[in-house]
Image (cartoon, rainbow, N blue to C red):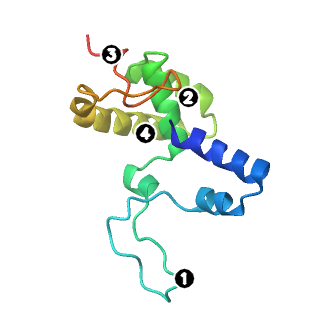
Amino acid sequence: ISKLDLKRMLLWGAKEFNYSVLDEIVEAPPTAELRPMADGDEEGREHSQTDEEDMGMTYKELGAFGRLRKISRCGPVSMFHKLCIMWRHLPPSEVAAKVKRFFYYYSLNRHKMCVITPAYHAEAYSPDDNRFDLRQ
């Protein structure tokens, strides 16, 4: 399940069942918690590392990349063209830099997706799903 789908489910649960703690979970910055927390008082301490800063892209952007790669079967050029239309608020040079960054890390980590354990796939896009292996 994607992070955005999980957040939507948590927000639904918070509203439907009146669980305010789910709102707190949604508002917390995604982090691997691998580095010590930043200095400050015990209550006000924040994580010195967040996933989105480390990746250089947001989970919303990552979801768009993943859907274009897996569902639309886009390579770097076709992904760039589609994202220039989808992300009109960004200049083409920034879209190109994000696409290059995505495919750089995608190629570095592709080997990790070749052998998978049995899993349930709830949507057409999943980073663990190699039913539609795009290496040809």
| 26 over 115 or under it: above or below | below
- Which secondary structure lies at badge 1? loop
Q: Which image quarter holds the C terminus?
A: top left
Q: Residue furthest bottom?
A: 41
Are the residues at dot 4 and dot 2 in contact (C-beta closer than 8 Å)? no
**Amino acid type, label 2:** Cys
Residue carrying label 1: 44
Residue 87 image offset from top left, x and y in percent:
60, 34
Give the label, 1 or 4, closer to the camera: 1
The residue carrying pointer 3 sits among few (fewer than 14), some (14 to 19) or many (20 or more) residues within 10 Å by Cα, namely few
Decide if residue 66 is on the left or right side of residue 135. right
The residue carrying pointer 1 sits among few (fewer than 14), some (14 to 19) or many (20 or more) residues within 10 Å by Cα, namely few
**Amino acid type, label 1:** Gly
Sequence-wise first label, 1 or 4: 1
Are the residues at dot 2 and dot 3 in contact (C-beta closer than 8 Å)? no
- Nearer-the-camera pick, 99 or 60: 60
Give the label, 1 or 2, closer to the camera: 1
**Amino acid type, label 4:** Lys
Residue beneath the point at 34% across and 75% down: 36
Residue beneath the point at 28% across and 29% down: 113
Decide if residue 85 is on the left or right side of residue 45. right
Q: Quadrant of residue 102?
A: top left
Q: How far separated are the C-alphas under marks 3 and 4? A: 20 Å
- Nearer-the-camera pick, 95 or 50: 50
Residue carrying label 4: 98
- Nearer-the-camera pick, 30 or 91: 30
Sequence-wise first label, 1 or 2: 1
Residue carrying label 2: 84
